[in-house]
Amino acid sequence: MRVLGLAFVVALSGAIAPGPLLALVISQVLAQGFRAALFLLVGHALIEIVFVIGLRHGLGRLLARPRVRATLGGIGAGVLGYMGVALWLEASGATLAAGPQAAMAWYGLIVAGIGVSLSNPYFTGWWATVGTGQMAALDLRTGRDYLAFFAGHELGDLAWYLLVAALLAGGRQWLTDEVYQNLLRGCAVIILALAALFLALSLRILRRPAPAPAPGPPA
């Protein structure tokens, strides 16, 4: 539950950032309703599971080294801090305005969810720094750990994008730019708190005493 819960909260740092996926969710929900967001998120999740599997099999031994884990966790904390400050500063100018757009078929939405994710340098940068740093700081070891991380991350994405989709579909008349800006400010505070948490975790890893060397053979 610890891994799932932290992955859920940290996932918001990537999900809430204004970008092409959010823009596509807004335009397609306005064009055809709530279901559009579900298919877009399926595509987004498909590319993210590729990232998680790759990290699980390609970087496992490297991330087992305490100094590597601490370094990556520190980098991730730094990027989170930067994103939190940037999000707070940009919130005042954020807008939910979206122009009309033709509705896509369900399979087109899935492909679009993959495409806009990969085309966004923020997305790949998040996984290369914050995502990898979080996995390192949490010291994921087993397949169950990675599954919990992936599930928590996807639940974080779902919570944000489906909230936006539900508000657009059911209450567009009161979802003003001011409400959206306040949501972003609240999320910025959460991101900054998580940056401090992962920095503390990384420092704790560095303070752990090195394991004693194995005894040599008897003389």
Image (tube, rainbow, N blue to C red):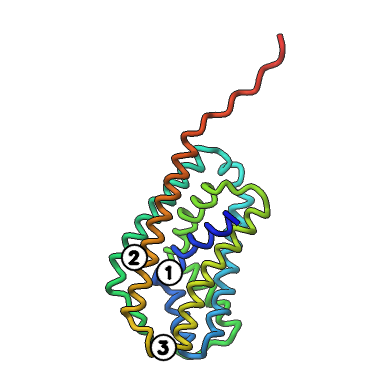
Tag 3: amino acid: Arg
Does dot 3 land on a helix, a strand or a loop?
loop
Tag 2: amino acid: Leu
- Residue under circle 2? 87
- Residue under circle 1? 16
Q: Which of marks 2 and 3 is in front?
A: 3
Q: Which of marks 1 and 2 is nearer the N terminus?
A: 1
| Residue 185 locus on image (x, y percent) | 34, 68
Q: Which residue does the image show at 55% across and 63% down from the upper left?
A: 153
| Residue 30 locus on image (x, y percent) | 45, 88
Does dot 1 land on a helix, a strand or a loop?
loop
- Residue under circle 3? 172
Residue that lies at the very extreme toward the top in this rendered image: 219
Q: Which residue does the image show at 49% across and 69% down from the upper left?
A: 117
Q: How far apart are marks 2 and 3 (CA)?
A: 23 Å
Q: Do the residues labelled 1 and 2 touch (CB within 8 Å)?
A: yes
Name the quarter where the N terminus is drawn.
Answer: bottom right
Name the quarter where the C terminus is drawn.
Answer: top right
| Residue 27 locus on image (x, y percent) | 44, 85
